[in-house]
Amino acid sequence: MSNPFAVEAWEAEGDAYLRAGDHVVTVAEADGTTTSSGGYPQIELRLENDGGSIRDWIVITPATYGKIAQVIQAIGAELPDENQHISKDDHRIAQAYLDAQWVGKQVGIIAREEPGYNDPSKMWTKIKGYVSVDKIVPGATPPVSNAGDVQGGFGTNGNSDIPF
């Protein structure tokens, strides 16, 4: 048996990852063909600007219809036609609609740091919401999370004078 790793190594590629903040981005990719780990249809987004890129996964369930409406309104897209662009069985949005109405459009994102789901000691940048581009203030500093300073002490927001 030959060594399976005796092949040409992949090149490291990719751009910078957008950090917490309010950003104007372009929808570079909107893949509506994927399915979440829970078996629901989802839209996988790759958003980018000159500072880097970030991904978001929007699972399509009744609980997230409002988030999808938020993206549609923030982009300024037309609503998908319920007879042509929305699957009757699982409400998956047609790829042709996403390509025509989302990809290439600019949108504002609100990205914040939050503790990782599986490891709260690690912080991850997550998209918390979508807004129209005119709502983004260039160079604005995102607010500090009130979830506690994970590295400075749990629940103290970094204030060591608090005795608990």
Image (cartoon, helix red, strand yellow):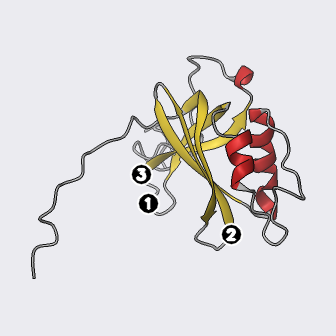
* Extreme residue toward the bottom, this view: 1
Q: Position of residue 10 (x, y in %)?
A: 24, 52
Characterize the local packing of mark 3: few (<14), some (14-19) or many (20 or more) Cα atoms within 10 angstroms.
Answer: few
Q: CA distance from mark 3 to mark 1?
A: 6 Å
The residue tagged 2 is 40
Q: Is residue 153 above or below residue 130?
A: below
Q: Residue at the location (76% across, 56% down)?
A: 64
Q: Residue at the location (58% across, 49% down)?
A: 56
Say whether disc 1 or disc 2 marks the residue closer to the N-terminus: 2
Q: Residue at the location (15% across, 67% down)?
A: 5
Circle 3/circle 1 CB separation < 8 Å = yes
The residue tagged 3 is 122
Numbered label tally: 3
Q: Nearer the viewer, residue 124 or 23?
A: 23
The residue tagged 1 is 119
Q: CA distance from mark 3 to mark 2?
A: 27 Å
Give the SS element for disc 2: loop
Q: Is residue 110 above or below residue 121?
A: above
Q: Is residue 90 found left or right of 17 in the rendered image?
A: right
Q: Position of residue 131 (x, y in %)?
A: 73, 32
Q: Position of residue 159 (x, y in %)?
A: 47, 36
Q: Is residue 91 above or below residue 132?
A: below
Give the SS element for disc 3: loop
Q: CA distance from mark 1 to mark 2?
A: 24 Å
Q: Residue at the location (70% across, 47% down)?
A: 98
* Three-letter amino acid code of the residue under disc 1: Asp
Q: Nearer the viewer, residue 152 or 61?
A: 61
* Three-letter amino acid code of the residue under disc 2: Tyr
Say whether disc 3 or disc 2 marks the residue closer to the N-terminus: 2
Which image quarter is the N terminus in?
bottom left
Characterize the local packing of mark 2: few (<14), some (14-19) or many (20 or more) Cα atoms within 10 angstroms.
Answer: some
